[in-house]
Amino acid sequence: MSGPDNRFTHIPPRLSGLVELAYNLWWSWHPEARVLFKQLNQVAWKTSVHNPVRMLRDAPVEFFDTAEKNAEYLRRYEIVMNRFRRYMNARTGWFREQYPEGRTLTIAYFSAEYGLHHSLPMYAGGLGFLAGDFLKECSDLGVPLVAVGFMYSEGYLHQHIRADGWQEGIRETLDRDAAPVKRVLNESGEQLVIRVPYIEPPISVAVWKVDVGRVPLYLLDTDIPLNDPASRRISSNLYTSDREERLKQEIVLGIGGRKVLHSLGILYSAVHLNEGHPAFALLERIRERVERGIPFGEALCQVQVTSVFTTHTPVAAGHDVFPEELMDRYFSTYYPALGIDRETFFRLGAHPDFPGEGFNMTVLAMRLSACHNAVSRRHGELARQMWRNLWKDLPYDRIPIDAITNGVHLPSWMNPRIEDLIDTYVYPVTPNWQQEHDDETIWDLIDEIPDEKLWDLHFDLKIKLINRIRERKRIQWAKGQEDPRTLVTGGLLLNPSTLTIGFARRFATYKRAGLIFSDMDRLRRLVTDRWRPVQIVFAGKAHPSDDDGKRVLQQIYQIAQLPVFEGRIAFVEDYSEQSAQYLVHGVDVWLNNPLPPMEASGTSGMKAALNGVINLSILDGWWLEGYNGRNGWAFGSDSAVDNRDEEDARAIYNLLENEVVPLYYSSALDGIPHGWVSMMKESIKSNAPRFSARRMVKEYVSRYYPEMMSGADVAYSCVLKR
C-alpha cells in the first residue's frame, strides 16, 4: 500500500502519528481523535471541512511547532494514538469471543455506494450510509470483512438551487490527494491496475484503499489513461441514468471487484451483496470455478451456499434490468467462459413473470445466493410477495427471504455531547455501556438524566444547527454567489425558540416532500401562530434525471419564498453527511411521510431518535417496529385508497395542532416542557438499542456468516430461518 509522501514532510516526527490517524476513518466516529486535529488550529479545521488529510497537507509548519511545544496537547496526542493502536491491534472482541474456533471466516462485502464521511462523497442516500455504518460496526465488533466499491471522481451530485427553485448540478472533481484514501501499489511501486476479465471492449481499473477502522475498503477507478474516454467515465458519477454506462459500472463493480481481491491475494469464505448492483461478482466466482474444471452446475451450488443478498427496494422500478442486446454487447465472450450457452445465461437473469423484459440484476442475485434478506419486517413481507414466483413450488411462508431490520452506527450518529450526558448517568451503573449499547435494559437509565440537562443540551444543538445554516448563507453571500431572494429561503430568519420540524431525504416523488403543503391556509396558520409558531427545515436532492422530483423541490422552494410564511420555511442546499449530522442533532421533530409501502426501512428517523429528536412518521418501514405510542407520533392506516394524500395530510395537521404543538409549548414554571422531554427520553431509550448497527451486524453474523463454512447445509438452513 502507498504510504504518506512528501506532502507531509513539514510535520515533525514527534507528531507523525497524525498522518497515520488521518488516513483511517476511525477518527470519524471517535470525537477525541477529531479534537486532536481541531486543536492544531480551529480555523484550519473548519476551512478543511473537517477533513484531516486536507488540513495536514495545507497547514503551515507553525501549527505543528506550537503543538509540539504544548505539553497538554502532547499528552492528549499520546492518549488518542495509544487508544487507536490498541483498537487496530486488538486480538479480542465480540466476534472472537462468540466464534473462538479460530477458523478463517472473511466476508467480501460489495456495494455500489458507501456513506462514510463527507470527505469521501461516494453516496447518494440511505443505501450508502447503511453500507458505511455496516463497515464501521464490523470493525468495532471485530468481524473479519473486506469491502469493495467505486471511487467516484465526481460523486453523486453537488446541488445548487437557483433563485427560481430549480436544482442544478455543479461539477466538482474529488481531489484524491486531499482525501483519506490511498493508492494500492503493485510490486513495482506503481498503482495497481487490473483488467476486467472476459469483457470486451477491455476495461482497466486502478485500485484505491480506504481504511475504515479494521475493515479495508477497496475502491475501483476507471479514470486512467489506459482506458478510452467512454470507459474513463464509468467511475465518474454515482447512478448514471445512461443504461449502457450503468451496465458497465455494474460489470466493473462485480467482475472487476472480484478480480481485484484475487489480484491482492485476499481469500474470503463468502460474499455479501448490498443490493443487486454488484451481482456480477457471483457470476465471476462461478467462472473461476469453471476455469478450474468444476462443472457449471456444481460451481453454481458452491457459490450459492456461500452468498448473502440484501435487497433494499420494494418497488419494481428500482431494480436494474438491462436489454438483451446490451447484455450481448458485453457478455458474448463471457458466458462461454461459464461453460453455458446464451439461453442458459439469460435464464439466470430472467424474471419468471416478465421473461422478455431483459436481464434483471435482482433476479440474478436471488438465483445465485442461498440467503436473502429484506431490511425491515414489513419489507420482508413485501419482498416475499414480490419474488415468490422465483420459488413457485414453495408456500408463501417458506419463501427464503428473511428480514433483518436496518440499524445505524451509534458512535457516528449520536452527538458526542449527548453521549457524554448519558455517560454521566449510565457509567456509574454500567461502565461498559458503549460496548453493550444494543442491550435494551441499559437504556432505562436515561430516565435518571434531569429534564433540564437534556433540554438545555438539545436547545444548544438547535442553536448550533441554525447558526450553521446562517453561516453558510453568509459565506455564500460574501463570495457574491447568492441571489438576495435565496437568503430567506436558505434559513436566515429561523428562530431557535420555535418548534422546528426537519424533513431531509432524497427527493423522489414517493417520499411526498410536499405533502405538508396540501392545505396551504391550514399550514400557514400553524407556521405563523403568534404564540406557538412552527418552522420547517427541508433538505435533500433529486436525482439529476428525475425532473418530477426536481419539480417537487422547486415547488417547496418557491413556497418558502412567500412572505405569508414569514421566513419560517427553509431549504438547506447541497444536503450531505455533514448537514445531516446537524439536522438529526438539532431539529425537534423528524417528519417522514412516504407513500406506503415504498419505504423499505428508512434510517434517518433512527439517527434523529438517538439524539432525542421525536419522530412524526407514517406507519411504514422501520417505524412500524419502532413506534410504541410513547416515543413519537404515527399516522397512516392500512386501508387502501386510490389517493391517500389528502387523508395523510389531514392526519399530519391534526397531530400538529392537537398534540405536537401543545406539548412542545407546555412549559412549567422552570421553563422546561417536561412532557416533551419525557417523550425525548422515550425516543432515545426505546430506539437506540433496537435500531443500532450493533444489533443489525450481530444478526447478520449469527444468522448467516458462520454457516457459510458449512457448505451445502446453508441453503436449507436459510430457507428455514423465518
Image (cartoon, helix red, strand yellow):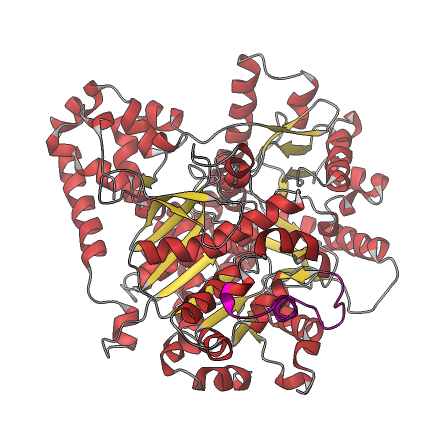
Residue 79: x, y in percent?
17, 45
Image point 35% across, 56% down: which residue?
261
Pick whichever, 316 or 455, lies toward us: 316
Relative to 597, 178 lies left or right: left
Q: Nearer the viewer, residue 702 or 261?
A: 261
What is the span of residues highlighted in magenta in the rendered image? 337-357
The residue sitting at 53% across, 13% down in the picture is 478
Front position in the image: 656 or 132: 132
Q: Is residue 398 left or right of residue 253?
A: right
- Answer above or below: position of 82 versus 578: below
Compared with 318, 193 (above or below) is above
What quarter of the picture does the C terminus occupy? bottom right
**Residue 13 covered by magenta stretch:** no
Image quarter (top left, top right, bottom left or bottom right) of the N terminus:
top left
Query: Where, by quadrant of the figure, is residue 135 drawn?
Result: bottom left
Q: Is residue 344 magenta?
A: yes
- What is the tally of numbered marks visible in this picture? 0
Q: In front: 261, or 167?
A: 261
Please provide percent x and percent y for residue 551: 77, 36
Instruction: Identify whether 585 is placed above or below 131.
Output: above
Residue 450 visible, this orientation: no
What residue appears at the point 55 percent right and 26 percent down from the top-left corner? 470
